[in-house]
Structures are given as C-alpha cells and as structure tokens.
Image: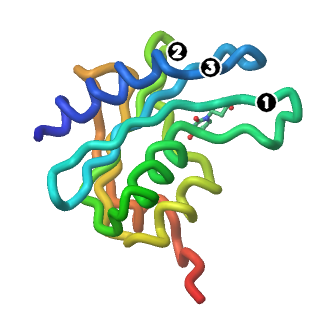
C-alpha cells in the first residue's frame, strides 16, 4: 500500500461525508498493522459540537474491530483546494495508539506530504 494509494482511498471515503452545515467533505483511510484499511468520513450534527471528524470515524471503526496498531493515516478533502491536516482532537485521539503513525495529507494525490503524528502533536497526553 503506497501513500498515494492510501490517499486515494481517503478521497473516495469523502463521498460518505454528511456535511450539510459546512459543506466541507473529508475522507480518511487508516492502515492497520495487519494491512487492513479502515475508511471514514465526517458526520456533522445540528448541535455542531457533536460532529465527528473523518479521522475519528475511521479510528473508531478500526478500534471497535479489535485493531490497536496502525501504520499510516491519509486524510483528504477533495475539491477544497488544500490539505486537511487532522484537528487537535483527532491528533490526541490517534496518539492513544502511537505517535509514530505516518500521517499523509495533500491538496490532491499529486501533492501529498507525510509526517509523523509525533511531529503534529507535541507532548501528547498519556495517563
Ligand atoms: N473535519 C474533519 O473531518 N477532519 C479534520 O481534521 C478537520 C475537520 C470536519 C469536521 C466538520 O464536519 C468539517 O470538517 C468542517 O470543520
């Protein structure tokens, strides 16, 4: 699974977004250590704070299927003209499962960039 392939899965996953309030459709593709990919999209709510991001949707699907180790996460917001780096809540949520996660973002598949979660979240919280 290349970074571009994972990013393209995130692009496809954005089609599952429910974003009637912002119109900002995000897709995520999370590659588990066993090679399984879990996708997700943002699901908004009329009580705006109840909205869940694409990244956490994918992570919740994976974790509730028993996965705990992850290699990479791609995030895409096709047509928005820019990359969709994970928000602060999602960074902490993912940090629970390891700071060495490879996070792949970009405005499109030809302009992706990969960094570690540790690089995105300084001094993430652990109990
Ligand atoms: N959103 C995500 O899905 N992931 C992010 O990392 C940032 C924001 C969603 C939440 C909301 O539905 C919309 O994008 C606008 O904030």
- Residue farthest left in this picture: 1
Pointer 3: what residue?
A: 24
Q: Nearer the viewer, residue 53 or 102?
A: 53
Instruction: Please state the total of marks drawn on the protein image.
Output: 3
For marks 2 and 3, give the CA distance.
Answer: 8 Å
Badge 2: residue crowd in 10 Å (few <14, some 14–19, many ≥20): some
Circle on res. 80: 2
Q: Please tell me whether mark 2 or mark 3 is closer to you in this view.
A: 3
- Residue farthest bottom in this picture: 127
Q: Please, what secondary structure does the residue beneath circle 3 have?
A: loop
- Residue 86 against residue 97 in the figure, above or below: above
Coloring applied to the structure:
rainbow
Q: Please, what secondary structure does the residue beneath circle 2 have?
A: loop
Quadrant where the C terminus is found in the figure = bottom right
Q: Please, what secondary structure does the residue beneath circle 1 have?
A: loop
CB at disc 3 and ligand 1 closer than 8 Å? yes
> Is 55 placed left or right of 12 in the picture?
right
Residue 113 % position (x, y): 29, 39
Query: Residue 98: which quarter of the image?
Result: bottom left
Circle on res. 45: 1
Q: Please tell me whether mark 1 or mark 3 is closer to you in this view.
A: 1
Q: Nearer the viewer, residue 93 or 37?
A: 37
Residue 51 % position (x, y): 73, 38
Q: Residue at x 79, y 42 (%)?
A: 50
| Sequence order check, earlier mark of 2 and 3 | 3
Q: Residue at x 26, y 49 (%)?
A: 31
Residue 93 % position (x, y): 55, 62
């Amino acid at each position: 699974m290349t970074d571009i392939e994972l990013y393209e899965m995130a692009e496809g996953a954005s089609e599952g977004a429910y974003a009637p309030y912002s119109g900002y459709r995000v897709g995520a593709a999370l590659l588990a250590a066993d090679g399984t990919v879990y996708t997700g999209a943002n699901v908004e709510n009329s009580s705006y704070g109840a909205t869940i991001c694409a990244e956490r949707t994918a992570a919740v699907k994976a974790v509730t299927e028993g996965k705990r180790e992850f290699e990479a996460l791609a995030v895409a917001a096709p047509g928005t003209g820019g990359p969709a780096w994970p928000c602060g809540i999602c960074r902490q949520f993912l940090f629970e499962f390891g700071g060495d996660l490879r996070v792949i973002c970009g405005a499109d598949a030809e302009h992706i960039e990969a960094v570690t979660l540790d690089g995105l979240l300084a001094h993430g919280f652990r109990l």
